[in-house]
Amino acid sequence: MNEPSTLAPVGVVGLGLMGSSIVAALLVAGHPVRAIAPIAPEAGEAPERIAGQLRQCHDAGLIVSTEPYLDALSISQDYGMLAGCVLVIECVIEKPEIKSAVYAKITAAVEAECIIGSNTSAIPISELQKFVDNPARFLGIHWAEPAFMTRFLEITCGEQTDPLFADSVFEMANRWGKEPTLLKKDIRGFITNRLMYAVYREIFHQIESGQATREDVDKAFRYDAGSWMTLMGIFRRMDYVGLKDFETMLTRIFPQLSSSAEVPAVMQQMVREGARGVHNDRGLFSYEPGEGRQWDEAFARFNHEIHRLAAEYSAEKVKAYLQ
Amino acid sequence: MNEPSTLAPVGVVGLGLMGSSIVAALLVAGHPVRAIAPIAPEAGEAPERIAGQLRQCHDAGLIVSTEPYLDALSISQDYGMLAGCVLVIECVIEKPEIKSAVYAKITAAVEAECIIGSNTSAIPISELQKFVDNPARFLGIHWAEPAFMTRFLEITCGEQTDPLFADSVFEMANRWGKEPTLLKKDIRGFITNRLMYAVYREIFHQIESGQATREDVDKAFRYDAGSWMTLMGIFRRMDYVGLKDFETMLTRIFPQLSSSAEVPAVMQQMVREGARGVHNDRGLFSYEPGEGRQWDEAFARFNHEIHRLAAEYSAEKVKAYLQ
């Protein structure tokens, strides 16, 4: 992507799965990374995991060799190391009291203009912001797994965020090879999440009323929606279908859609039964023991391929064929 | 796929874009195809278009040569040619009175047990069924464009459809290399369409309330949802994310989602202005003159690649790595 260590230093706090993945993404983008591992076991596992992720980047042709990027990484439990960072990204667990303590340590170490971002997908930025000294510099920086392979990145402002800081992260994200989105209002649930909730509400309604099976929905999404999603997104798909009949269709179908506020019975049951999906091989689909891990590996490989396809078929390239 | 002309003859009525594409799919699957072109200009254009589609199948490695498949195609304006077909698929325009007249001609030509399917995506099967002699054999067979490349196929029963006929089409579709879904109830709007309407309702709401821009949504879907859709579908994605926090999230977010029955203002305006998306280079996104056609070509190529990826990462193959 970029030469190693050519950009300003960036900090990452929290080296779980997501944190490590973000570290790898930032290294590949050309930042020296100062990583804080507040949890001792994570500090032990992280170097090997990040080295493996850099090898994946190498295999995908993103970098020519892993060593100089790995050399740009320092891992410590000492927050003092964050001094001089232009940006610090927090990826610790989704508990406000823990995040609050982490922000106190970050702000004690960094300069007043250092941007602080949270990878949270559960807690409103406006709430977390209250824990941060000089809250105007605090915002959400929400990555998709694996961070070093996916192009998605969602930047969310809280009520007190100065938009200039958000614009600055937006520009950085472009340099990281992302396709960042910038949410200027702090709505709970981020764009994709929110839209997926609209899908969940409707799909569980269809299944509970016997109109479709789980397998039907799976096929419809994988082979129909999936066939154009990465190329067209939502609105270009509407343009592609032709906008002519949409008004009639929306008028007819909107009133028929589920507007339920109830958690679907099947989800309630799954939770009661302790199902954790591929993480314990018990979920909405059935899994053989160990199959969950296969999905992890398949996703890493698949993501690499879909990432390549998405870049190859960008709107700019489709348009460029015109010339 | 299969050797040419090894299966029973199938009829197709209507040789517009979709009809031609379905003809190509059936030829490649190994059926002799008897195609009725009720509209003279379509009869003229169709042979060349279908030959081009077969060349695409050849380039994609689906067939070894185009000629024997093309030889299995007869095109005529004479419905009498449909005698002996095991299945006839209607793909004429979405006007009940025209479809009704077409069904009268089809049923006059075919045997009583010949299955008749409609590719409609706008008119309920239960309504169309009323026009058909021996309505138990009538059902919806809904393809995705381009039919010869996509794996999606949605079979829909009307109120009077005998499920045995639906099962029979389901089995045929598997032989065609599809991943068919079978909707036993005739709900208006098909699975993907219905879910997409749930997405549209929410997304226009977000945009109208200034929470996101069209470009943000585009990126979120292309780079986030698009990155896992073809691999995981909806429910396996939930399993992958882990089901743990879903109950809390759904409880919180469902009541916040749009439940509007109103057509979004921007859609009303587009329709008033005669925007037809990529078909006249005026839509929700802006297009240069001729750019719409580029999207058509890009989609044909993209679809070919995503089709390959979907097959390579089927649930069976992911599981097979376990052994």
Image (cartoon, coloured by chain):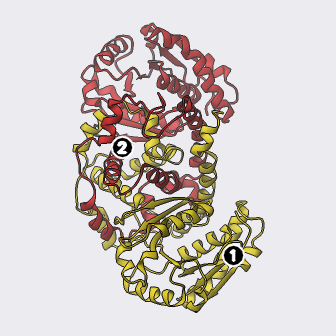
Chain colours: A red, B yellow
* Element on which disc 2 rests: helix
Residue A305 occupies quadrant: top right
Residue ID at (40%, 28%): A119
Q: Chain of mark 1?
A: B
A113 on left or right of B251? right
Real-space Cα separation, disc 1 to disc 2, in angstroms? 43 Å
> Residue flagged by tag 1: what amino acid is it?
Ala
Q: Nearer the viewer, mark 1 or mark 2?
A: 1
- In the picture, the disc for residue A80 is none
Percent across and percent down for residue A6 are 58, 25
- Residue at image x 67%, y 24%? A66
Please indicate, yes or no, whether residue B144 appears anywhere in the rendered image.
no
A120 and B157: which one is in front?
Answer: B157
- Structural crowding at the residue carrying mark 1, measured as other residues with C-alpha within 10 Å and reported as few (<14), some (14–19) or many (≥20): some
Name the residue that disc number 1 marks. B51
Whether residue A70 can be seen here: yes
Which is nearer the eye, B227 or A75? B227
Q: Which residue is mark 2?
A: A191
Residue A126 image-quadrant placement: top left
- Residue B200 locus on image (x, y percent): 34, 56
Q: Residues within 10 Å of mark 2 (few under 14, many from 20)?
A: many
From the top left corner, tell me how far across and down residue A317 is, in percent.
Answer: 58, 55
Count of labels shown?
2
Which residue is nearer to you in this view: A66 or B160?
A: B160
Tag 1 near tag 2, CB within 8 Å = no
What residue appears at the point 29 percent right and 41 percent down from the top-left corner?
A265
Q: Amino acid at mark 2?
A: Ile
